[in-house]
Amino acid sequence: MKFKLHLTLLFFFLSFYSAQAQYGYGYGNGWWCYACDFGIEVGGIASNINGMDASEKAGLYIGLYNSYEFNDHWGIRYGMGYANVGAKIKEYDTNVVLHTMLIEPISVHYTFRDKFKTFLGTTIGSTMVGKNPYNEVETGMTLFPKGIKHFDFSVFAGGGYKLTDNLDLNLRYNLGLTNINDMENATDKWKSNWLLLSLAYTFR
């Protein structure tokens, strides 16, 4: 029930963001940015948590963003999204699952040879629903899982290829900088990292 509620609230917020970004305030296409373009990004994730005896876990990413191009080379993006990240715990043969809402404050993009691009940015994550097998009291999916910090900060870098003027293929790596281990008397540092392969479509 809590999981369904979380997804309902998430998609409501994404729908609100989409509406504001698409119609904007004033004459532009962006949300608080009259000259920005609105876009959607969907992809697959391979994630892990450093500090755990774990292997990679597959997940899903969906994001909405605004973008602004200063010229043929430089541009910025900002937006928000959802990521299903975590790790597969070898000891328990189960997963740490973190359903996380992401806020991407800003990323800088550089395009060269008209088709190729690189980018660098930062992300703030908020884990609202998850499963922490190390918590013996609540081992299933719970709202704000105990033993996991609710906020995470990461940096990311990647590259992409423009398939068309509107569609691009991207590969990026998120490096977690926050120790998300909030277990009692914990000494191990858990840092969530993930690799994303995605398709992004920009409405121009």
Image (cartoon, helix red, strand yellow):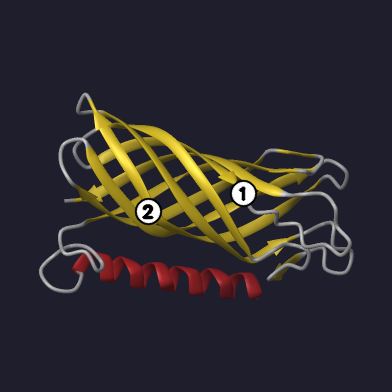
Residue at image location 65% in from the left, 66% down from the top: 150
Q: Position of residue 63 (x, y in %)?
A: 41, 55
Dot 2 surroundings within 10 Å: few (below 14), some, or many (20 or more)?
Answer: some
Disc 2 versus disc 1: distance between alpha carbons?
Answer: 17 Å
Q: Position of residue 42 (x, y in %)?
A: 41, 48
Q: Is residue 35 above or below residue 85?
A: below
- Disc 2 marks which residue? 106
Residue 118's image quarter?
top left
Residue at image location 41% in from the left, 41% down from the top: 120
Residue 34 or 54: which is nearer the viewer?
34
- Which amino acid, by three-letter code, is at mark 2? Ile
Dot 1 surroundings within 10 Å: few (below 14), some, or many (20 or more)?
Answer: some
- Which amino acid, by three-letter code, is at mark 1? Leu
- Disc 1 marks which residue? 177
Residue 81 or 5: which is nearer the viewer?
81
Please say if the residues under marks 2 and 1 sit with CB atoms less than 8 Å apart.
no
Asked whether, in this view, residue 77 is left or right of residue 149, the answer is left
